[in-house]
Image: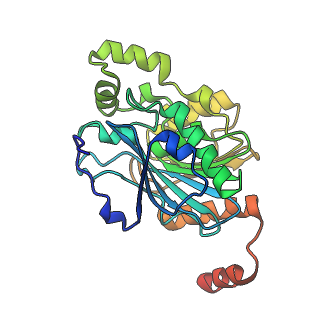
Amino acid sequence: MVFPVETDYRRWRQKEYRYSLDEFLALSDLPSGLIMIDYGSVELALLVKNRGAAANFYGFHAAQSPLTRQPVPYFQGRKVAPRRMNQILISDPSLYLDDNVRVGWFLGNKYCDLANDLPRVMDKIDALTGTDKRLLWGNSAGGTAALIYGRPQDIAVVMNPQIILRNFTWSRVQPWLLHGWDIEEYFEGQAYGDQFLDLRDQVTVGRIVYCQNEHDDHVELQLRPLAETLGVSAESGDDGRFKLILGDWGKGHIPPSSDIQQQIVGEEVERMLGKPRGLLARLRALKSA
């Protein structure tokens, strides 16, 4: 299959599986490896480690760098995903559209109705792994996905997410609208954004751990409007549903380090599953010594 962008499946060093959406939804076992759900013009790719664990970690990547473009499928979160959970990392199908599309917020495109299909895929994964416990994680645009695909019983851990896309850099939004939805004109795109790209009403996830760099314009453009909609404080704190961590991680749109993210995720895993026992607990103690 030929796509308009560079692909590289071998770099993930995983056994590869390719299904249609219907074939995936009919599976009786979830394999570990690189799974491609084929939409013809794009793919929904999953990097899966099925450990037989009691909960699932869903990881969503940030936008590709404006300076470098990596081949698709593209995944982030392997350093953050806890070993106590099954790992499901997701590559945004919109990155297959064109080299200029570096972000799609996992909102789908004209070839892939991701808003309807991804919840079905995640429900199927939960059924195949025998658990409905989920932690959703994401950086920036991946944080957007973690917020909007989280259910009331889930936990979302997000880093500097966008939630009002009309407040985001228009040059990043426009290629996705053009190649994903055939929206060419600026004012048509702005109208589309006004109608559909304020995602605050789609955030229904039960617990949000929101990590925001205090030197990022997202504080005013994204965090504060979402906090107002949810009726929560935009100051650091934890009220049970909304935990806000305001940090100094550098100038601009910079997330905390992987080590900090691991610690934050680990605390939420313990909240969900309890403290690790036996050998796992001893190994963790040795690592932190």
Residue 244 percent coordinates (x, y): 63, 47
Q: Is residue 82 visible?
A: yes
Q: Is residue 137 above or below residue 193?
A: below
The colouring scheme, among rainbow, by chain, secondary structure or one colour, is rainbow
Q: Nearer the viewer, residue 248 or 274?
A: 274
The residue located at (22%, 40%) in the rendering is 4
The residue located at (48%, 59%) in the rendering is 77
Q: Is residue 52 above or below residue 68?
A: below
Quarter assignment of residue 208: top right
Q: How many marks?
A: 0
Q: Nearer the viewer, residue 190 or 226?
A: 190
The residue located at (65%, 57%) in the rendering is 129
Residue 146 percent coordinates (x, y): 56, 44
Q: Is residue 60 above or below residue 98?
A: below
278 horizontally vs 43: left or right: right
- For the C terminus, the quadrant is bottom right
Q: Is residue 166 above or below residue 60?
A: above
Residue 53 percent coordinates (x, y): 67, 65
The residue located at (34%, 25%) in the rendering is 177
- For the N terminus, the quadrant is top left
Q: Nearer the viewer, residue 170 or 189?
A: 189
Residue 235 percent coordinates (x, y): 64, 43
Q: Nearer the viewer, residue 271 or 217?
A: 271
Q: Is residue 244 visible?
A: no
39 horizontally vs 259: left or right: left
